[in-house]
Amino acid sequence: MNNIHKIALSKPAKEWNRLAKNTSDINRAFYYNALKRLSEALQKGDKDEIETWTFNAE
């Protein structure tokens, strides 16, 4: 498993969403959103989404 996948799965998607909404740093918000979307994709097993959001989070 990729390190970014481990990070994405370390918190529930709702937590990543909360972090994204509560930061004023646009780069951090984008990163947290990418982790949220990656976490969701990993749980669904959607390979295309996993590839897309892994790239965005890295």
Image: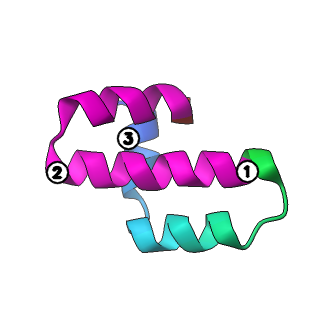
Q: Residue at x 16, y 51 (%)?
A: 44
- Of pointers 2 and 3, the one earlier in the residue sequence: 3
Residue with the mark numbered 1: 28
Identify the secondary structure beneath mark 3: helix
Main SS class of the magenta portion in the image: helix
Name the amino acid type tagged 3: His
Figure quadrant of residue 6: top left
Figure quadrant of residue 36: bottom left
The residue range painted magenta reads: 28-56
Name above or below for residue 1 compared with residue 34.
above
Dot label at residue 44: 2
Q: Which of marks 2 and 3 is in front?
A: 2
Q: Residue 14: x percent and y percent?
A: 44, 73
46 displayed left or right of 11: left
> Which quarter of the rendered picture does the C terminus lie within?
top right
Q: Which residue is drawn at 72% across and 73% down?
A: 22
Q: Residue 46: x percent and y percent?
A: 18, 39
Gap between marks 2 and 3 measured at Cα: 13 Å
Residue with the mark numbered 3: 5
Name the amino acid type tagged 2: Lys
